[in-house]
Amino acid sequence: MFEYQAIVLAAGEGKRMNAGENKQFVVIGKKPLIIHTLDVFSKDPWCSSIILVVSRKDRDRIEDLLDRYKPSKEIKIAIGGAERQESVYLGLQAMENKDTIVFIHDGARPFVSTESLHLLAEAAYAHKAALLAVPVTDTIKQRNGQTLHTLDRKTLWAAQTPQAFQYDIIFNAHQRAAEDNFLGTDDTSLVERLNIPVEIVMGSYDNMKLTTPEDLKRAQAFLKR
Ligand SMILES: Nc1ccn([C@@H]2O[C@H](COP(=O)(O)OP(=O)(O)OP(=O)(O)O)[C@@H](O)[C@H]2O)c(=O)n1
Ligand SMILES: C[C@](O)(CO)[C@H](O)COP(=O)(O)O
């Protein structure tokens, strides 16, 4: 068993989902999106604790949901920031046990499998930093002014979460990013810029992030399957 602590991010606003409320409260299948995500971690025996990062305005509603759905592990709440990166940094600061592997996961990715979590945990213990990713299946074009380039698809991976790190590595990476005003779109990018190697673990295309209304339709179809 390779134990880890999880930070689950839910302090965003879900603006691109256009759901009339924060996407994490949208019911898919029979439960709100964020409860699906928390259930994956609370049922995994390798996960020793969960910190859920939420916005101040959603805190009461989230606490009501936790009372109602009662995930099988205790969940500690931390208040997030204006950007995803700031929410992660605040989650890391709220963590009491710092001698640990930390998984950082988007609350908006409810379909990560336990198998993927365990492959990632094994890689994180072996390499100190690892992420789930899948090979890009489209042909990717890069436009520089009027000129187009086609990137070599064999080298391209789509980053997912969780991303897993030894605590001190990811904490230092966030500290340095804050000092340098560097804003990345994932946590691994903060570690990469310190020239620390990160292991890629093959994820699953099912581990989708629910960002737009089309994603919600895909999620409903996935649950029906
Ligand atoms: N300040 C923020 C912004 C995002 N997130 C979380 O990071 C995850 C991935 O972000 P994304 O899917 O982009 O969510 P939102 O920021 O909520 O979406 P949008 O950009 O459409 O508003 C989400 O689970 C979201 O709640 C966060 O904790 N704190
Ligand atoms: C971290 C992430 O899930 C990697 O794919 C993603 O970058 C976060 O969200 P966004 O869509 O880039 O805002």
Image: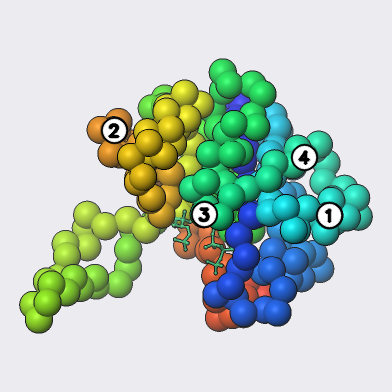
Circle 3 sits in a helix, a strand or a loop, which is it?
loop
Quadrant placement of the N terminus:
top right
Spatial CA distance of label 4 from label 1 is: 14 Å
* Ligand 1 found in image quarter: bottom right
Q: Along the polypeptide, which appears first: circle 2 or circle 4?
A: 4
In the foreground, 68 or 111: 68
Mark nearest the camera among 3 and 4 is 3
What is the three-letter code of the residue carrying label 1? Asp
- Circle 1 is placed at which residue position? 60
Side of 80 where 75 appears, left or right: right
Q: Along the polypeptide, which appears first: circle 3 or circle 4?
A: 4
Q: Along the polypeptide, which appears first: circle 2 or circle 3?
A: 3
Spatial CA distance of label 2 from label 4 is: 32 Å
Mark nearest the camera among 4 and 1 is 1
- For label 3, being within 8 Å of ligand 1 is answered yes
**Marks 3 and 4 in Cβ contact (< 8 Å):** no
Q: Judge the density around disc 2: few (<14), some (14-19), many (≥20) Cα neighbours within 10 Å.
A: few
Q: Along the polypeptide, which appears first: circle 4 or circle 1?
A: 1
Spatial CA distance of label 3 from label 4 is: 22 Å
Circle 1 sits in a helix, a strand or a loop, which is it?
helix
Q: Which mark is residue 75?
A: 4
Question: Relative to residue 191, is residue 184 depicted above or below?
Answer: below
- Circle 3 is placed at which residue position? 83
Q: Going 74% across and 42% down the picture, which residue do you hit?
A: 77
Is residue 58 in view from this perspective?
Answer: yes
- Circle 2 is placed at which residue position? 194
What is the three-letter code of the residue carrying label 3? Glu
**Marks 2 and 4 in Cβ contact (< 8 Å):** no
Q: Going 88% across and 55% down the picture, which residue do you hit?
A: 64
Mark nearest the camera among 2 and 4 is 2
